[in-house]
Structures are given as C-alpha cells and as structure tokens.
C-alpha cells in the first residue's frame, strides 16, 4: 500500500522532515521558495496533506483545485491564512499549534513592551550613529513599567501570560478587554480587572494587543482608538497584522499623539508600511514572537503530529474546524 503524500510548504527542521518521511511520501521545500498560489495548487494536486506556516493562503479556489487534500496543518497558533468556512465546507481539516508557544510569546511581548517604553531601539541607533557625545538629564527618557497600568486587549492564553508577568513581576495594575470575561479564579490569578475597550484605551499607560485576527477584529486600533490613548502611552502589537491600522499609527507616532509603539506584526507582511520605517519612536521586529529554537521545534512537532493523526484516520490534536462529514468522506475516498 502506497504512503499518503504530503507537502511541506516551507523549510522546516530537517529532523521533522525525516520523521515525516517514515510515514509519508514527502515533497519538502528545503530552499524555502515562496510559491505563488498557482504553484502551490500544482504541488498540492496529488497531496493528501500539507504543512503550512501561515504564509500560504488556503481558500475556496485552492481547495477546489486539490480534491485529494485532507488536512492543512499550520505551524502557527494563528490561522488567518485559512478560509475556515471554505475548508469546513470542502471537508478539509485545519489545525494550528496552540499552547506550545504561549510562554515564549508572552516573554517576547513583555520584552517588546520594555524595549518600546524605555526607547532601546531609538537610543541604540543614536549611539551607533556616533551622536552620543555627552550625558543629559532627559536623554531618551522613557516611561516606567513598574507600577504603571497595563491594558491587554485579547485575554487568551498569551494575554494571561503577559498579565501575570506584569502584575506579579512588575507590580503593574492590569486591566483587560476581551470578547468574554474570564472566570473569577483566572482574573484573580492574573490580578486583572475587566473594563470596556474605551476605558482601557483612555486609562492604560501601555496597551498590549493579543487578539486573534478576524474580519470583526480588523483595525481594532485605528485613528479613533489612537485618539483615545494618553499622549504618554505605548502600543504593542504581537497579535496579527491588520489588527492595527498601520497608516493611522504612523501618523499618530509622527505627530506624537502617543509616545511610542512596538510592532512584531504588520498589515501585508513581510511588507511594512513605508511611513513606519521613517518614524523614530517605534520598535519593529519581523514576526518573531515565538522564535526560540525550542519553541519553533515544538510547533513543528505538533504540526507533524496533526498530519500523522488525521492521515491515519484519527482525530486532529488541535483542530480549528469540524469538516463537513460528507465532503470529508469524499476526500478520503478520492482516487486518482
């Protein structure tokens, strides 16, 4: 009996590819070529599964072109590259990699907050340019983190991790806004108080965005929301590009309507809005919040485990949808 065929759409850990080869006929991408949608469809035409990384769009048109495909295993906790409704209707299982990156991403969110509030990137550029010639009392004076108010929008696992770091490690007052309020025990554990979005924006010294991307959360922070924030406040986005209106943010930073921003994600990434590259009071990183070797390996392993489970007829470990049973049965019965 022939092995199921899978595509590994981007370069990943070679050890994981070798493990997958024990169970599947694998087409890998060790040169990390970025394929067009047409090229991706051509490679998936004879595949039963694909390991994606968040940069491959899986939509209705692609699914129609690849009737044999049964699972898309995303090596990311976010899955806004998936058209989940289309995948569900087409009988294709989608999976992601939650939990394994929670603490690493929360670490990074807090690191980005600290770098932004204390103007680390801005001051390093100043030093490297040879401009540091004397001490002055207000040179790169930033804002305190300890004892300040941290406002978190999106209080899932990562948001809770950031809240605990702020409250327990830095004595911050933590307020949060979420689609639903946390259970009292979780609020107590995080030392967090639920407030409305407008109150959070008006009150927080540091606003942290950890909300999943969806059509409803598009431009959660735009010009109107930025206008509510304190002129001394910082904005941190480790969620997804599109949560923030990057053009409006660039204007607010240039006009010093808020003090600074730290961004790990961008609209249209890897492209970055050109105006963000010209303002000094922003810390920019290329979507690396989960990027430690240990955590990326765990993410890769979980994506591989999802492929193994589904293509062996078992339930997905971390599903993001429940495929239509009839459509799914057709895909498992497909022969070519």
Image (cartoon, grey):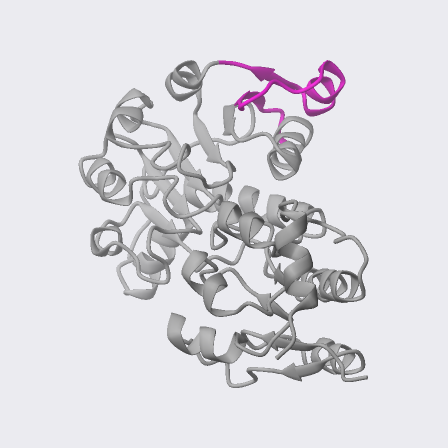
Locate residue 3, reporting x and y percent. 76, 81
Magenta stretch: includes residue 177: yes
Magenta part of the chain:
170-195
Image-quadrant location for residue 14: bottom right
Locate residue 110, reporting x and y percent. 56, 42
Magenta stretch: includes residue 97: no
Residue 95 visible in the current orientation: no
Q: Nearer the viewer, residue 39 or 109?
A: 39
Locate residue 305, reporting x and y percent. 76, 63
Image-quadrant location for residue 227: top left
Asked whether, in this view, residue 287 is left or right of residue 8, the answer is left
Q: Nearer the viewer, residue 174 or 26?
A: 26
Asked whether, in this view, residue 11 is left or right of residue 325, the answer is left
Up/down of 37 relative to 164, above or below:
below
Number of residue marks: 0
Asked whether, in this view, residue 332 is left or right of residue 146, the answer is right
What residue is shown at x 39% (from left), y 48% (from top)? 241
What residue is shown at x 23% (from left), y 49% (from top)? 279
Q: Quadrant of the N terminus?
A: bottom right
Q: Quadrant of the C terminus?
A: bottom right
Locate residue 331, reporting x and y percent. 64, 63
Q: Nearer the viewer, residue 182 or 151?
A: 182
Up/down of 225 relative to 91, above or below:
above
Residue 4 visible in the current orientation: yes
């Amino acid at each position: 009996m022939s092995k199921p065929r899978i595509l590994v759409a981007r370069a990943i850990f070679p050890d994981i590819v070798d493990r997958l080869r024990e169970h599947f006929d694998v087409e890998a991408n060790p040169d990390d070529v970025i394929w067009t949608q047409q090229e991706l469809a051509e490679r998936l035409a004879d595949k039963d599964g694909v390991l994606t990384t968040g940069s491959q769009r899986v939509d209705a048109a692609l699914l129609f072109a690849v009737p044999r495909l049964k699972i898309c295993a995303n090596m990311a906790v976010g899955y806004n590259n998936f058209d989940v409704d289309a995948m569900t209707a087409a009988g294709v299982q989608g999976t992601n990699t939650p939990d394994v990156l929670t603490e690493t991403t929360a670490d990074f969110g807090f690191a980005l907050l600290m770098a932004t509030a204390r103007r680390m990137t801005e001051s390093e550029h100043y030093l490297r340019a040879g401009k540091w010639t004397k001490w002055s009392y207000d040179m790169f004076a930033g804002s305190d983190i300890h004892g300040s108010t941290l406002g978190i929008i999106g209080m899932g696992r990562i948001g809770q991790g950031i809240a605990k770091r702020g409250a327990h490690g830095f004595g911050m007052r933590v307020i949060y806004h979420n689609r639903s309020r946390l259970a009292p025990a979780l609020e107590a554990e995080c030392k967090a108080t639920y407030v409305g979005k407008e109150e959070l924006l008006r009150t927080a010294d540091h606003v942290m965005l950890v909300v999943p991307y969806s059509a409803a959360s598009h431009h959660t922070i735009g010009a109107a929301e930025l206008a509510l924030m304190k002129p001394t406040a910082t904005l941190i986005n480790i969620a997804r590009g599109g949560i923030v209106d990057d053009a409006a943010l660039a204007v607010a930073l240039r006009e010093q309507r808020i003090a600074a921003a730290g961004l790990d994600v961008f609209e249209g990434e890897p492209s970055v809005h050109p105006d963000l590259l010209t303002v000094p009071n922003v810390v920019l990183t290329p979507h690396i919040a989960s990027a430690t070797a240990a955590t990326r390996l765990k993410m890769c392993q979980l994506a591989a485990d999802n492929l193994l489970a589904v293509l062996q007829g078992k339930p997905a470990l971390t599903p993001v949808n429940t495929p239509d049973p009839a459509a799914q049965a057709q895909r498992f019965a497909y022969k070519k």
